[in-house]
Image (spheres, rainbow, N blue to C red):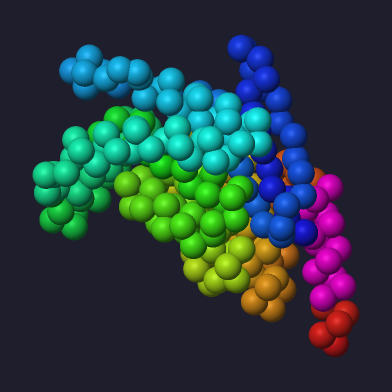
Amino acid sequence: MIVRFCAIVTALLGFGASAQARDDVVRQVAPRGAIVRTPTKSVAANRAPSPKSWYDAGMAAIRAKNPGRALEMMKPLLADFETRYAGETRHIYCALNTSQQKAYLSDAVAARLDAVTIEPDWCRAQYVRGYALIDLGKMDDALAAFHHLTDLAPKNSRYLNELGYVLADQKKYDDAAKAYRRSLAAIDLSPDDYDQEKCVAYRGIGYSMAKLGKLDDAEAAYRNCLAIGIDGDEVQNALDDLDQQRKQTV
């Protein structure tokens, strides 16, 4: 079984992580404030309340196990995004850092695509929305939310891991594995919890491959996570499950 991992800030100068079993696939909640960046002055000056305050409030609602409240809190921020960029004809990217921004614009040039990067507030709001939808069991809506999110931020490992989770939950294992592999490919551009996100992706690949009967590929993915040194007990349990699958197929 793959464990849904939840990392939440518990102190001003750090965060504590807890893990709980949920379904069979990996998820991760962003540490509170971990990906917050200050918007440019020209954009921030026109906003009240700030996007960060909405995001923090949404995360607090999720921690309080009130996803419905989190969903409602994101509506004004997402509506603001739709209004601000309603006439935008360029492809919009949310970049968390300059490395992502350069990568997005470079890819756009290569694809001859007219593009613009914007502050990450809208993506964080969409992330909270998608996470809340999963908690509410609205998986089709969550899938649409994470598809949209990864269109805005296609090189964000955390968002791609969430997309993989939803796809795997819907038994779309090939597509889930593709999302997790995209997460691995983007890992160097993702600023938060590098090792954890990498291991989440490997475990997601391992789970998907096991479901597809590709046990050798599943084992290789799980062992890649094991080598990182995170979630060792859970990964070993998954490897033990693979051994049982092999015995059943002999």
Judge by depth and name the residue closer to the eye, 27 or 188. 27
| Residue 33 horizontal side relative to residue 224, left or right | left
Judge by depth and name the residue closer to the eye, 44 or 221. 44
Residue drawn where x is 71% and y is 25% of the image:
16
Q: Does 250 appear above or below 117?
A: below
| Residue 212 horizontal side relative to residue 157, left or right | right
Q: Which residues are magenta?
A: 233-245
Q: Main secondary structure of the magenta part?
A: helix
Residue drawn where x is 55% and y is 71% of the image:
172
Q: Position of residue 93 (x, y in %)?
A: 27, 43
Q: Does 1 appear above or below 32?
A: below
Q: Does 42 appear above or below 220?
A: above
Which quadrant is the C terminus positioned in? bottom right
| Residue 187 horizontal side relative to residue 112, left or right | right
Residue drawn where x is 59% and y is 50% of the image:
136
Q: Position of residue 144 (x, y in %)?
A: 41, 58
